């Protein structure tokens, strides 16, 4: 496994496999790897000849006052884990390599995908997704992967990236893999490291809320409001104040009033102690 710190090193390493027609898989991460990341790396290892993992805490997707400075980092452990899966190249650039002096270009997806849910102005805001799509577009240009892997845990991000790839004619195949959970249901997240034992217990309310929504739907409830009420009740019971619990079309992210209209994304976000957590499930379709 090699660790590339510059775009040039990375491109040089990929030159010969690309010439030989090898398939290249890319797994973008911000590091502090957990089993969710590893599931993406394993999928890439199975399908692709060359696996590239990027390891970059992208300042552009953090708003002022968010946790950019405190975001958990442990590069040597990440490199060990990546190597154990058989990653070929880790691209771990310094910030100046990605955003050099005078950097002035962004990529922004519109169409109502980035100013709802996490992107609503009173939440993380559309600037969050602008940061994500800008860095992912750059990674697609630097790596030119055949396949890129993302997690359903960040459902809105996956929808936004698919749209960007389609709209900007990236030829990469976007694979979105299921959310990996702790045995008790908590969705794995690097930010779970912020949780103390009591907060860790309360954080379980997010996945319980989603299971309650699924049960309501399974027992025949089709009104989104009623399904969301079941989810909210679980959060309230645990004393977790949701930032949002919403139902929307899983592809367009338009609000869904009914579960009859195809795949509906039920998404939840809540601050639990120092950690802002998100989780989701898709019902129907
Ligand atoms: P991050 O390092 O948090 O930016 O995540 C890197 C990639 O891993 C993104 O595509 C995430 O959606 C994905 N990911 C994060 N947590 C999980 C999880 N629990 N299960 C599956 N994928 C995940």
Image (spheres, rainbow, N blue to C red):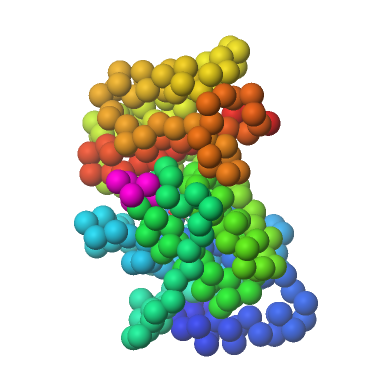
The residue that appears at 36% across and 27% down in the rendered structure is 205
The residue that appears at 42% across and 50% down in the rendered structure is 115
**Percent of width and height locating residue 128:** 38, 57
Of the 4 image quadrants, the one containing the C terminus is top right
Corner quadrant of residue 95: bottom left
Q: Is residue 120 visible?
A: yes
Magenta stretch contains residue 241: no
Which residue is most to the front?
111
The residue that appears at 47% across and 27% down in the rendered structure is 210
The secondary structure that most of the magenta stretch takes on is loop
Q: Is residue 179 above or below residue 190?
A: above
Q: Horizontally, is 216 left or right of 61 in the view?
A: right
| Observer-nearest of 36 and 111 | 111
Of the 4 image quadrants, the one containing the N terminus is bottom right
| Observer-nearest of 220 and 273 | 220
Q: How many marks?
A: 0
Corner quadrant of residue 214: top right
Q: Which residues are magenta?
A: 119-124
Q: Is residue 118 above or below residue 13?
A: above
Q: Is residue 200 above or below residue 9?
A: above
Q: Horizontally, is 139 left or right of 105 in the view?
A: right
**Percent of width and height locating residue 51:** 62, 67
The residue that appears at 63% across and 33% down in the rendered structure is 263
**Percent of width and height locating residue 267:** 46, 36
Q: Is residue 211 visible?
A: no
| Observer-nearest of 85 and 195 | 195
**Percent of width and height locating residue 68:** 28, 61
């Amino acid at each position: 496994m090699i660790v590339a710190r510059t775009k040039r090193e990375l491109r040089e390493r990929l030159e010969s496999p690309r010439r030989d027609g090898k398939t290249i898989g890319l797994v973008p991460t911000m590091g502090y790897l957990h089993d969710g990341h590893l599931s993406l790396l394993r999928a890439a290892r199975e399908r692709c000849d060359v696996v590239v993992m990027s390891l970059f805490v992208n300042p552009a997707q953090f708003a002022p006052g968010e946790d950019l400075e405190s975001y958990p980092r442990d590069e040597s452990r990440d490199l060990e884990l990546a190597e154990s899966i058989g990653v070929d190249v880790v691209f771990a650039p310094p910030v100046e390599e990605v955003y050099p002096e005078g950097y002035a270009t962004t990529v922004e997806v519109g169409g109502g995908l980035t100013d709802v849910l996490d992107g609503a102005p009173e939440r993380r805001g559309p600037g969050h997704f602008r940061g994500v799509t800008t860095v992912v577009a750059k990674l697609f240009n630097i790596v030119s992967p055949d396949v890129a892997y993302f997690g359903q845990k960040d459902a809105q991000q996956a929808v936004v990236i698919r749209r960007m790839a389609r709209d900007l004619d990236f030829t990469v195949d976007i694979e979105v893999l299921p959310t990996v959970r702790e045995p008790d249901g908590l969705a794995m997240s690097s930010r779970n490291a912020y949780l103390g034992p009591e907060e860790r217990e309360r954080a379980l309310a997010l996945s319980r809320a989603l299971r309650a929504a699924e049960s309501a739907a399974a027992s025949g409830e089709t009104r989104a409001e009623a399904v969301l009420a079941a989810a909210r009740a679980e959060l309230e019971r645990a004393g977790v104040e949701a930032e949002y619990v919403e139902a929307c079309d899983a592809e367009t992210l338009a609000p869904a009033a009914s579960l009859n209209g195809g795949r509906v994304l039920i998404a939840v976000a809540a601050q639990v102690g120092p950690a802002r957590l998100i989780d989701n499930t898709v019902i129907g379709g």
